[in-house]
Amino acid sequence: MEAVSQHQALKEKAKQDYQLYRSNFSLFWFLANAVYYIFVLVMVETPSSSAYYSGNLTYLDIFTMYLAILVCFRSFFGLIYVLKWNYRYAFDKRF
């Protein structure tokens, strides 16, 4: 009986630790995106009111493309993961 309660307490502590980790990571991610947004606003200067592309890649362009690729990658494989588990829950009796 005591081993079961200890196991349950460990599971609850692990759950709380994970929730804390997720909230801290989400806060860090939000702040990093806010800093990047401010960085882009400060560093980008357009000569006129209409922005144009001159064909030269700068470090800001490359980093922005890297972030866009990362978001697309995570979104695509996240969608595949969710669809896989929804399919398993709907049609596979083991889950």
Image: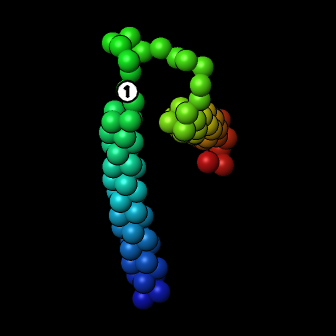
Q: Residue at x 38, y 74 (%)?
A: 13
- 29 relative to 7, above or below: above
Please identify the residue farthest to the bottom as the structure is shown.
Answer: 2
**Residue 88 location, x and y as percent?**
64, 40
- From the viewer's perspective, is 22 left or right of 77? left
Disc 1 target residue: 45
**Residue 56 location, x and y as percent?**
59, 25
Q: Is residue 75 visible?
A: no
- 61 relative to 15, above or below: above
Q: Nearer the viewer, residue 54 or 9?
A: 54
- From the viewer's perspective, is 40 left or right of 94? left
Please identify the residue farthest to the top as the structure is shown.
Answer: 50
Q: Secondary structure at mark 1?
A: loop
Please identify the residue farthest to the front as the structure is shown.
Answer: 47
Q: Nearer the viewer, residue 16 or 75?
A: 75
Q: Residue at x 61, y 48 (%)?
A: 95
**Residue 17 location, x and y as percent?**
39, 69
Coloration of the structure image: rainbow
Q: Label 1: how many residues lie within 10 Å, few (<14), some (14-19) or many (20+)?
A: few
Q: Amino acid at mark 1?
A: Glu
Quadrant location, the N terminus: bottom left
- 83 relative to 23, above or below: above
Q: Quadrant of residue 71?
A: top right
**Residue 42 location, x and y as percent?**
33, 36
